[in-house]
Image (cartoon, coloured by chain):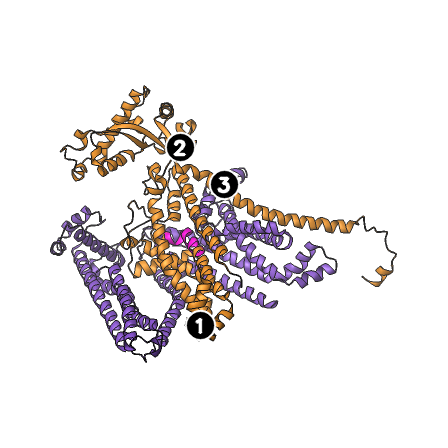
Chain colours: A orange, B purple
Amino acid sequence: MTAPAMAAPAKATSLIEPDARTRRRNASERRFRLLGLSAVGVGLLALVILLTSVLGNGLSAFRQTWITIPVTLDAAVLDKQGNRNPDEMKKVTTLGYGKLVQQALLDALVEKGISTGDLTPKEVMALLSKEAPADLRDAVLADPSLVGQTIAFPAFATSRIDGYFKGRVTRESAERDANISPAQLDLADRMAEAGLIETRFNMGFLTRPDASELRPEAAGLGVAILGSAYMMIVVLVLSLPIGVAASIYLEELAPKNRWTDLIEINIANLAAVPSIVYGILALALFINILGLPQSAPLVGGLVLTLMTLPTIIIATRASLKAVPPSIRDAALGVGASKMQAIFHHVLPLAMPGILTGTILGLARALGESAPLLLIGMVAFVRDFPGAPPQGFLDPAAALPVQVYSWTQRADPAFVERASGAIIVLLAFLMAMNALAIILRRRFERRW
Amino acid sequence: MSLGLLLLLLIALAALGYVAGRQRALAAVRGDARDLHSLPAYYGQAVALAAAVPGLLVMVVWLITQPLLVERTTLSLILTEDIGPGSSRELVMADIRRIAEGMGVLVATGAANEGEIAALATQPDALKDRLAAVNVALAAPISAPVAQAALVYRQSMETGQGAMAAAVLAVAVAGFLLALWRVTPAFRARNVVERVVQVLLIAASSLAILTTAGIIFSLLLESWHFFQLYPARDFFLSLTWSPKFGGGSDLGLWPLLWGTLYVSVIALLVAVPIGLMAAIYLSEYASPGLRAIAKPAIEVLAGIPSIVYGLFALMTVGPFLRDWFAQPMGLGDSSSSVMTAGVVMGIMLIPYVSSLSDDIINAVPQALRDGSYAIGATQSETIRQVVFPAALPGIVGAILMAASRAIGETMIVVLGAGAAAKLDLNPFEAMTTVTVKIVSQLTGDTEFASPETLVAFALGLTLFVFTLGLNVLALYIVRKYREQYE
């Protein structure tokens, strides 16, 4: 305030009635506050929209439409020799089973008195998944004693029929669709009324392998879940000991010199290297130079290990640092060597923190897809990888990459399955995070 | 001998070593541990380490060098004129590896024995048929030298495996015996064990340097190959990107870089205001109750894998932006666009900006705020004119880190931004980024001879340099700032 201003007669102001300037300032204060609150709101809203969009699109992937028909497994067709030898029965191809299923379907329709209208038998058969005969064949080969019996065979409905019962396919869209006609939908309606078609929970989505482009209804996450599990085993086995060892050295033993400085800078930078660059490293080093096989969980696990190591090291160092120096001093005071003090006292006390950090690192690795694309994990893999240790070198898929490859396929039913796969992935991540939180709550010590 | 069995043997030997070393030490002093230099367990550990560590070391080195050496000798069997047009050494080597693998399958399934395999190698056509029967399909007919080379490859790999097992076991047993022989009451077992453990710890922490070195080495090596096939000038200066797998491609960096920067700028325009305001609100205004809920909830966004955001962009945001903004405004009808990818990436970056800024705002000393309140400033005036300027360097660092993450993000742009390399200003147009092209040039085939594939490494190098630069700058700024108030 300048002197003349102070000298001027004071304006009639009231403490109760704020003047214009105060009102302006208070209004701007409220605006600012509202702006902040709405930023928080936008963040939370984004989270809610993201989750509802994924859940809304994906939950239906866990349910599937089945057409259950009685199939008579004619021994004259399936086992000509009649000695129920699976090796001989393998000669009957899926085509042979297809005819059987088609006949059974037509018979079932006649028996229930459902008119097929002017649909040809082929068009009626098109209600069933192309995977159905193969499934029947697998079931018979697994249990040859079924031959000669009449079994109630639940066949996958084709993805369009499935979509119709889930509301994804409508009569309008069927008009324009070469794969399904409204007449077929009418037939499906009549079959559903007669109890031949039902939609229920599909365990196969979690256990079956991937299926080809034309059979989205049969595609499952089995190989992907197993592949991801194998990779997580590799990551855990490699990154936990290496990460802990590196952290112990850097936090407890390392002298302050150029070499340790270099290591510190490297770890900080590696944590920020884009994941795709790790993929390039893996492709050039593990696959091209070392000749490891493509799409192998071992290679995927190695890349993810390199990616998670910085995370684990940072978490481990934090929890080692949280152990008070008095513990070390006490151990040294009663005659322990430095190594004994670390391994017998500091490390066990830091263990809950280390495990929490490791689980969070694993969760991050589980969701990572970019580097896995480059090492060939996008390849179409139908066969389950073998048992360890050979299984680590067999081709496999991974959960997040399976999502990606499903989005790249033309049939819209795959988008539903991709969202379903995301739900599975998020469920795993939530379980891991919950475990980490429980560990922290249960064992964390405050000094 | 399989690798798993060998490892198991090594572990068994180490376990045996532990027991034997401990027993021998105790036996030497007739069970009175007080006469030993170290605790008995250390003698056991010393023997176990001596058995396992050298053996493992030999194994690792062998596993890395053997394929390199065997490939070199195998390739020397293939003359330059045997390599067909449109093929390359790498392709031939891939064929050889595949054929050798197929031979292994033949033997494993009992379809042929070693003698038959050797005979088959002289009849390439018969070999191809036999391989096709065990689902090892080959595109081109096998040439005679390749079949021979595959046989040699297979045999030397097999002998190599055997020799490795022998060498590893020999080294392990030698270490075991030597260590056991050295176990005497005066042997300073603890010191030895601790020194070995320390070396192992140092080795583990040096892995970080090895990783960085590996990244730089692989990027530089393959980029160098690329620049030998394709002029660096064109890569860095050309404005068109149109790879043709027949040759004669234009591989200009600029359209990709433009797409990357455009997407990143939009992402930051979304993330920085929201993240920053959220951080300010949560650290300055929010009640403890709201903070306890909202802060973790926003951080959940950081824990969601990027493939989820990618799918979100593809299924929800893309069609929404197309139907409500792009088409009504006449800006195009593509659901994958710079805007889609940018907005979704922005959502992903909100927690990075907010939690980093939150830390930084909290680090501003309370005395600065109190001083400001004391001279009558409102809370928002204090934040805008005192706290924010004081925190600015740190916030800039946080934004730079978010920017580096945006540039390196892959899955969102692969699913949300499109694949057309364009230099365009319309944000509702599909454009592509460096990371998208790395993925599309490298997925599927790994024929490392054409510039169209190798360009991915040059792109990777560009990406690495960009993100590293941003991070180093950000770390420098943040550190510099932190010191200010300590």
Look at mark 3 in the image and give the residue it sits on.
A52
Mark 1 vs 3: CB contact within 8 A: no
| B251 or A237: nearer the viewer | A237
Q: Which chain does the numbered disc 3 sit on?
A: A
Front residue of B63 and A333 = A333
> Along the polypeptide, which appears first: circle 1 or circle 3?
3
Quarter of the image with the N terminus of chain B in it? bottom left
Left or right, B283 with reference to A346: right
Task: Same chain for labels 1 and 3? Say yes or no.
Answer: yes
Mark 1 or mark 2: whose residue is earlier in sequence: 2
Q: What amino acid does circle 2 point to? A: Gly
Q: CA distance from mark 1 to mark 2?
A: 62 Å
Quadrant of the image occupied by residue B360: bottom right
Q: Nearer the viewer, mark 1 or mark 2?
A: 1
Q: Position of residue A371 (x, y in %)?
A: 39, 54
What is the chain letter for disc 1? A
Q: Is residue B78 visible?
A: no
Q: What's the residue type where badge 3 is placed?
A: Thr
The answer to whether the residue labelled 2 contacts the one labelled 3, judged by CB atoms less than 8 Å apart, is no
Look at the image and say whether residue A361 sits in the magenta stretch.
yes
Q: Is residue B174 visible?
A: yes
Residue under label 2, please give it.
Answer: A163
Instruction: Kindly identify which residue carries mark 1.
Output: A253
- Rendered view: B313 above or below A443: above
